[in-house]
Image (spheres, grey):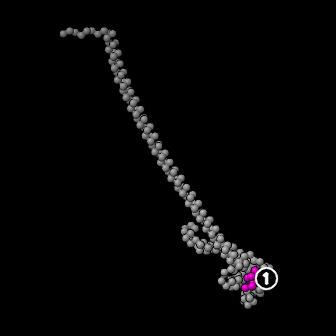
């Protein structure tokens, strides 16, 4: 059996170099594989984060859109209610204006003499018994005959009737000494009863609106 040839320094160096190259290639391949895996993980994480951010942004956008739509709807509803309320108030104002005009002339009012007499009686109760001046428009004074005028005094007031312009019709009574006065003109009566008159007009003209909560 032949003995192996003794190695030389050159052969040893060559073999070591080959081994080193082989190990280096293996390490480089492993390093490349690790780097590739890390890159894939980073890319996957970045993609997941991007998709998550995009989804969150979409959800936020949808929520903002819903909030915006809700806000626009609320504004539209508020404007609609305001428009309806303004129309309702104009309608009531017009109806009350026509009523004031009708009362001022007693046009179409049943038993106008009794209406004027009621104005006088109501006003007199604001004064102490005694001499009283009763001011009223000429057309309304003409409705009260002497018998009615005496009855209005009821033995407590001595009435002196004067024809004059009275705002919107009705009567104004004043004690002879000028210390007490009561304005029972149509205009004054409407001012005193404005809330009640408006509620009544609303109930008659807009019954459905009156039954709604918050109106």
Give the vertical position of 5 relative to 108 (above or below): above
Residue 74 image-quadrant placement: bottom right
Residue stretch in magenta: 135-143
Q: In the rendered picture of this protein, how many numbered marks are placed on residues? A: 1
Residue under the image location 67 percent in, 72 percent down: 97
Residue 144, given in percent of the width and then of the height, sits at: 73, 86
Residue 123 image-quadrant placement: bottom right
Foreground residue among 132 and 207: 207
Residue 40, given in percent of the width and then of the height, sits at: 40, 34
Residue 34 image-quadrant placement: top left
Foreground residue among 65 and 10: 65
Residue 101, given in percent of the width and then of the height, sits at: 69, 75
**Residue extending farthest front:** 108
**Residue extending farthest right:** 177
Give the vertical position of 121 relative to 67 (above or below): below
Foreground residue among 135 and 40: 135
Quadrant containing the N terminus is top left
Residue 185, given in percent of the width and then of the height, sits at: 72, 77
Residue under the image location 61 percent in, 68 percent down: 88
Give the vertical position of 180 relative to 11 (above or below): below
Residue 80 in view in this figure: yes
Image side of residue 207 versus residue 104, left or right: left
Image side of residue 211 versus residue 141, left or right: left
Q: Residues within 10 Å of mark 1 (few under 14, many from 20)?
A: some
Q: Mark 1 = which residue?
A: 162
């Amino acid at each position: 059996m032949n003995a192996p040839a003794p190695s030389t320094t050159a052969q040893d160096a060559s073999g070591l170099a080959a081994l080193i190259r082989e190990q280096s290639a293996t390490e480089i391949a492993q390093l490349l594989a690790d780097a590739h895996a890390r890159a894939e993980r980073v890319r996957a994480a970045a993609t997941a984060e991007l998709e998550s951010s995009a989804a969150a942004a979409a959800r936020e956008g949808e929520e903002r859109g819903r909030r915006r739509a809700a806000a626009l709807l609320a504004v539209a509803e508020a404007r609609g209610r305001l428009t309806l309320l303004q129309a309702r108030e104009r309608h009531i104002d017009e109806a009350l204006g026509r009523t004031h005009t009708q009362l001022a002339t007693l046009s179409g009012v049943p038993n106008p003499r009794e209406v004027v007499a009621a104005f006088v009686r109501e006003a007199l109760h604001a004064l102490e018994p005694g001499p009283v001046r009763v001011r009223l428009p000429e057309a309304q004074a003409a409705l009260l005959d002497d018998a009615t005028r005496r009855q209005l005094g009821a033995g407590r007031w001595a009435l002196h009737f004067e024809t004059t312009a009275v705002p919107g019709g009705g009567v104004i009574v004043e004690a002879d000494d000028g210390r007490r006065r009561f304005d029972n003109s149509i205009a004054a009566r409407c001012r005193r009863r404005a809330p009640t008159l408006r509620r009544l007009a609303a109930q008659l003209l807009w019954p459905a609106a009156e039954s709604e909560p918050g109106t």
